């Protein structure tokens, strides 16, 4: 059976020694001292390890069932949900006026990683609600906020997002769901949505659906889309669930993974809906939820990679097979543990070096979300630039990490007993939903590079440049971290320059290289994180602070990444510079 132990020491190191949250100057961070974060994260770890993780296999094996229009979640999910709800974990960053704890988003992000590693399918129920809450909080009227948020914040009601329809996915301009004005300020919503995570379940008293639909007579395409609140039960004046709305779950998807989460076909048959935000401005409002969801999905990729690595490492330390070619390391046993073998160590270090830097990237991103929420426009722009990178790159590499972890176990990794095959299956969806990773790369190159006239990407380059310059007087740091980071950043800048020069001549030149650019960007981000972590570890070692073994391992793992992983930026650049010709020449009929 798989295990999970929360990476508390890792998180504390990133929060306090790398990001220096208490001294960051971000409003609300002054209270995040080591004792406070240790207490909060420690309690979340207990919940993840003792309550959620034991249900991960249960959810995978049992799945959800649809009975008379009601979805039954796996055994133990409802009781676990109540524990999460009672602890206030799903809304720790929501405003106090609606029942939240008003903690910074970075705390929600850190606890979220633990919950996803422990049980990704379960955590999706509360994750979707969080996004729906944020959307209502940002775009809702005062009445809508007071009607829905207190119940959603306390977890007695949940939320969803309804975008996709059977005939269209990413191209939302093609949606057919209609919203007919009812004459009383409400709308009648009719249509079908598919792949709706947590669309129907038995965990809460009400489910608040956020539904994209078109008001007749509006503009064509995405400009004619509006967003509506469509609750399963219409709220009474006293806030309790009232009459059943005209919507239903038409079926459950049979999926590769995340079996414990209900993925529903939702039918709306003249259901009562309430406009959220402005008419025909639905995409603007929905992007609040979609952008948060994309960052959360990036974290899902990381979290599945992290738990898979943990289990692969445990296996490699215990499994006896073969002898170290340089001499027996376990002379009293029949064989050495497989962790002595160079190829197994390479495999594990690929996993470890990704997971630790990916975690730093997610938490650094969370600091920018907190800055943006407090009015920092530069931070908001940087988050917008990095969102497709965090979503696309981290989920690609997270899935790859689960496969590497499965490979570490050999034949055992292919069996259900050890749990690695579930991590692989669960991680796979993260590359697809909330915008496939191909779409993320197109968004990055087609929209985000030009953000603010290119000022945001230039600000990123300057940030990396400053990081690569700071500490050059340390020869080892310069050779092992600063110079590799500088070289990778130059590759990223060269790729951006290629798009500017060649993309204008032929847009396919840019679009054919967009996926490589997303990965190139992601590698530079992780190189930046490793450089920052290396500086922090070296500073602490020199000062005699912290756990010396932990800090030395941090430096050695970072050195591995910079030497063995970061040079791939050169390959990505070469692919980008090859242009559209190798991609577009073959006639479609000859594929």
Image (tube, helix red, strand yellow):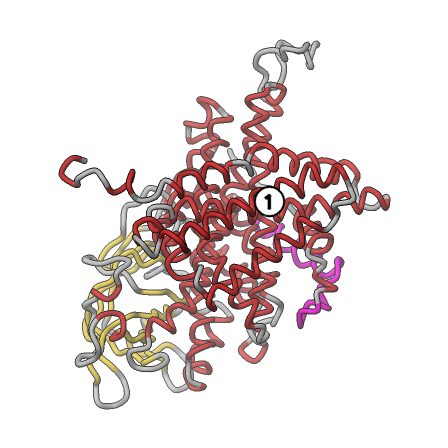
Q: Position of residue 376 (x, y in %)?
A: 58, 72
403 left or right of 257? right
Q: Is residue 122 visible?
A: no
Who is closer to the viewer here, 456 or 408? 456
Q: Which residue is mark 1?
A: 527
Residue 511 is a magenta residue: no
Residue 32 is a magenta residue: yes
- Outermost residue toward the right in this view: 544
Who is closer to the viewer here, 569 or 1? 569
Dot 1: what SS? helix
Residue at image coords 70%, 61%: 21
Q: Position of residue 17 (x, y in %)?
A: 73, 52
Q: Position of residue 40 (x, y in %)?
A: 66, 59
Asked if 178 appears above or below 142 in the picture, the reply is: above
Q: Quadrant of the C terminus?
A: top left
- Outermost residue toward the left in this view: 589
Question: How many marks are shown on the rendered structure?
Answer: 1
186 left or right of 491? left
Residue at image coords 31%, 80%: 274
Q: Which residues are magenta?
A: 25-49
Q: Quadrant of residue 59?
A: top left
Q: Position of residue 427 (x, y in %)?
A: 43, 43
Q: Is residue 314 visible?
A: yes
Asked if 330 appears above or below 552 in the picture, the reply is: above
Within 10 angstroms of label 1, few (less than 14), some, or many (20 or more) residues? many
Q: Main secondary structure of the magenta part?
A: helix
């Amino acid at each position: 059976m798989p295990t999970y132990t929360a990476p508390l020491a890792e998180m504390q190191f990133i929060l306090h020694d790398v990001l220096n949250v208490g001294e960051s100057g971000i409003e609300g961070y002054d209270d995040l001292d080591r004792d406070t974060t240790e207490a909060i994260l420690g309690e979340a770890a207990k919940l993840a390890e003792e309550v959620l993780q034991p249900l991960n296999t249960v959810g995978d094996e049992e799945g959800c069932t649809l009975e008379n229009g009601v979805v039954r979640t796996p055994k133990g999910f409802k009781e676990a949900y109540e524990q999460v709800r009672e602890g206030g974990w799903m809304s720790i960053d929501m405003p106090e006026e609606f029942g939240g704890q008003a903690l910074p988003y970075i705390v929600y992000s850190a606890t979220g990683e633990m919950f996803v590693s422990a049980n990704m399918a379960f955590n999706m129920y509360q994750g979707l609600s969080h996004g729906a809450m944020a959307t209502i909080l940002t775009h809702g009227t005062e009445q809508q906020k007071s009607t829905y948020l207190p119940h959603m914040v306390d977890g007695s009601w949940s939320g969803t997002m309804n975008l996709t329809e059977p005939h269209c996915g990413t191209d939302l301009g093609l949606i057919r769901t209609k919203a007919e004005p009812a004459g009383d300020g409400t709308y009648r919503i009719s249509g079908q949505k598919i792949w709706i995570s947590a669309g129907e379940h038995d965990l809460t008293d009400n489910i608040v659906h956020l539904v994209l639909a078109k008001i007749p007579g509006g503009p064509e395409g995405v400009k004619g889309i509006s967003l509506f609140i469509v609750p399963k039960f219409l709220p009474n004046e006293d806030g309790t669930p009232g009459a059943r709305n005209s919507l239903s779950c038409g079926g459950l998807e049979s999926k590769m993974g995340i079996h414990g989460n209900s993925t529903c076909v939702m039918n709306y048959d003249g259901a009562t809906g309430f406009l959220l935000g402005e008419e025909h401005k639905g995409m603007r409002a929905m992007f609040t939820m979609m952008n948060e969801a994309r960052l959360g999905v990036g974290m899902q990729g990381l979290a599945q990679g992290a738990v898979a690595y943990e289990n692969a490492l445990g296996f490699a330390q215990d499994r006896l097979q073969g002898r170290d070619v340089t001499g027996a390391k376990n002379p009293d046993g029949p064989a050495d543990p497989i962790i002595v073998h160079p190829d197994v160590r390479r495999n594990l270090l690929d996993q470890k070096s990704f997971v630790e830097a990916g975690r730093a990237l997610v938490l650094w991103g969370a600091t920018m979300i907190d800055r943006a929420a407090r009015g920092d426009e530069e931070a908001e722009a940087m988050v917008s630039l990095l969102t497709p990178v965090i979503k696309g790159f981290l989920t690609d590499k997270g899935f790859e990490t689960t496969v590497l972890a499965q490979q570490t176990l050999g034949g055992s990794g292919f069996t259900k007993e050890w749990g690695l095959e579930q991590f692989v299956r669960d991680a796979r969806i993260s590359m697809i939903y909330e915008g496939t990773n191909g779409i993320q790369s197109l968004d990055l190159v087609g929209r985000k590079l030009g953000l603010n006239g290119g000022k945001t990407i230039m600000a990123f380059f300057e940030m990396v440049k400053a990081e690569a310059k700071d500490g050059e007087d340390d020869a080892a740091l310069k050779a092992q971290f600063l110079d590799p980071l500088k070289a990778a950043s130059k590759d990223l800048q060269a790729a951006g320059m290629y798009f500017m020069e060649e993309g204008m001549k032929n847009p396919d030149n840019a679009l054919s290289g967009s996926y490589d650019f997303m990965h190139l960007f992601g590698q530079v981000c992780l190189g930046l994180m490793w450089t920052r972590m290396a500086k922090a570890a070296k500073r602490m070692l020199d000062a005699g602070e912290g756990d010396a073994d932990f800090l030395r391992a941090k430096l050695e793992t970072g050195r591995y990444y910079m030497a063995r992983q970061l040079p791939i930026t050169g390959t990505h650049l070469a692919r980008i510079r090859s242009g559209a010709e190798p991609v577009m020449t073959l006639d479609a009929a000859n594929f």
